[in-house]
Image: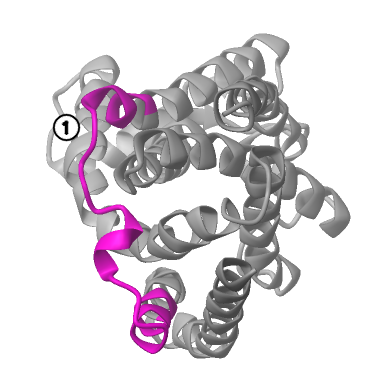
């Protein structure tokens, strides 16, 4: 009973700090024109929770863990995004490839003489390395909270399906004000449509990331997953897709195809987690 009370108190302190700092991070978005302060606010809430609750920062899962799970964190989202875009391009929901985007990249990289294929390959390599490393601090800020603290604490109270679903839903709701206020999303599809598919996508990813966190006992596989998802969606596959009037309904994080794809993969990890964690 004391164990449960301690966990509930820790979660209450964490959510209090997250809510308080959310308003600060949200305000800073307008000052910096970046989402980084809001993402880092979750990490700060986590550190403050550890201080108040006298909880060791080492308990957040800083160990690197097995490379198997690091690679899973990197490659699972890439595979989901790649297959989703094969469907998008094949079904005509968007086209491959965006010549104007590659022309812009040629000018940006000062590689005007390169072919489209070479500049695309170079952009992918650069994005998957330099851009990925640059994005890690802000992503780590979020993941310290959601997978570093929240998932392990919830696992003391709930079965794996509940841990995965609750943590994923909290993470999704955390995004809602940004979508509702037009800071995140598109201007074509209805708000309810964007919220539904973003929530489906985020909760489904949360299931996979909760599995990786508990299985590896490390924070880093979820960090790699989050980084890979953001980088390849926002900087590679969405930009190289040629949009048409149907595209906003199907592509990106607010469309149907990627959300349904990650949902299907999440069902596998939900069942896998039930077998591996709840049967012990």
Residue 252 lies in magenta, yes or no?
Answer: no
Q: Residue at x 56, y 67 (%)?
A: 3
Residue 62 lies in magenta, yes or no?
Answer: yes
**Residue designated by label 1:** 112
Query: Of 245 and 209, which appears nearest the observer?
Result: 209
Coloured how? one colour
Q: Which residues are magenta?
A: 45-72
Farthest top residue in view? 90
Farthest front residue in view? 1
Q: Quadrant of the C terminus?
A: top right
Where is residue 227 drawn, in percent x and y? 36, 45
In the figure, 90 relative to 62: above or below? above
Residue 183: which quarter of the image?
bottom right
Is residue 154 rendered to the left or right of residue 264? Answer: left
Where is residue 269 drawn, in percent x and y? 59, 25
Query: Of 85 and 229, which appears nearest the observer?
Result: 229
Q: Residue at x 45, y 73 (%)?
A: 42
Answer whether residue 238 is visible to the viewer in this image: yes
Answer whether residue 98 is visible to the viewer in this image: no
In the figure, 120 relative to 43: above or below? above
Where is residue 216 drawn, in percent x and y? 35, 35
Magenta portion: prevailing SS class: helix
Q: Residue at x 65, y 9 (%)?
A: 90
Q: Quadrant of the N terminus?
A: bottom right
Q: Secondary structure at mark 1?
A: loop
Where is residue 188 drawn, in percent x and y? 78, 51
In the figure, 268 relative to 246: above or below? above
Residue 240: which quarter of the image?
top left
Is residue 18 rendered to the left or right of residue 216? Answer: right
Q: Residue at x 72, y 49 (%)?
A: 199
- Count up the numbered dots: 1
Residue 114: which quarter of the image?
top left
């Amino acid at each position: 009973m004391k164990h449960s009370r301690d966990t509930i108190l820790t979660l209450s302190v964490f959510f209090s700090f997250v809510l308080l700092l959310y308003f600060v991070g949200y305000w800073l978005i307008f000052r910096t024109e970046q989402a980084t302060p809001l993402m880092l606010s979750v990490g700060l809430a986590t550190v403050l929770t550890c201080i108040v609750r006298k909880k060791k920062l080492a308990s957040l899962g800083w160990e690197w863990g097995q490379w198997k799970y690091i690679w899973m964190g990197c490659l699972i989202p890439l595979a989901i995004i790649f297959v989703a875009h094969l469907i998008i391009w094949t079904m005509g929901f968007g086209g491959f490839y965006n010549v104007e985007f590659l022309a812009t990249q040629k000018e940006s990289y000062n590689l005007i003489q390169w072919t489209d294929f070479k500049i695309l390959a170079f952009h992918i390599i650069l994005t998957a390395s330099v851009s990925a490393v640059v994005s890690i601090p802000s992503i780590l800020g979020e993941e310290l909270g959601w997978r570093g603290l929240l998932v392990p604490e919830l696992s003391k109270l709930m079965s794996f399906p509940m841990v995965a679903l609750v943590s994923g839903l909290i993470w999704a709701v955390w995004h809602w004000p940004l979508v509702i206020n037009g800071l995140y999303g598109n201007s074509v599809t209805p708000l309810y449509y964007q919220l539904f598919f973003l929530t489906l996508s985020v909760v489904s990813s949360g299931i996979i990331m909760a599995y990786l966190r508990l299985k590896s006992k490390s924070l880093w596989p979820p960090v790699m997953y989050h980084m890979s998802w953001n980088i390849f969606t926002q900087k590679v596959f969405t930009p190289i897709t040629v949009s048409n009037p149907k595209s906003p309904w199907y592509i990106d994080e607010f469309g149907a195809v990627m959300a349904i794809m990650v949902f299907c993969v999440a069902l596998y990890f939900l069942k896998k987690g039930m077998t591996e964690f709840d049967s012990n």
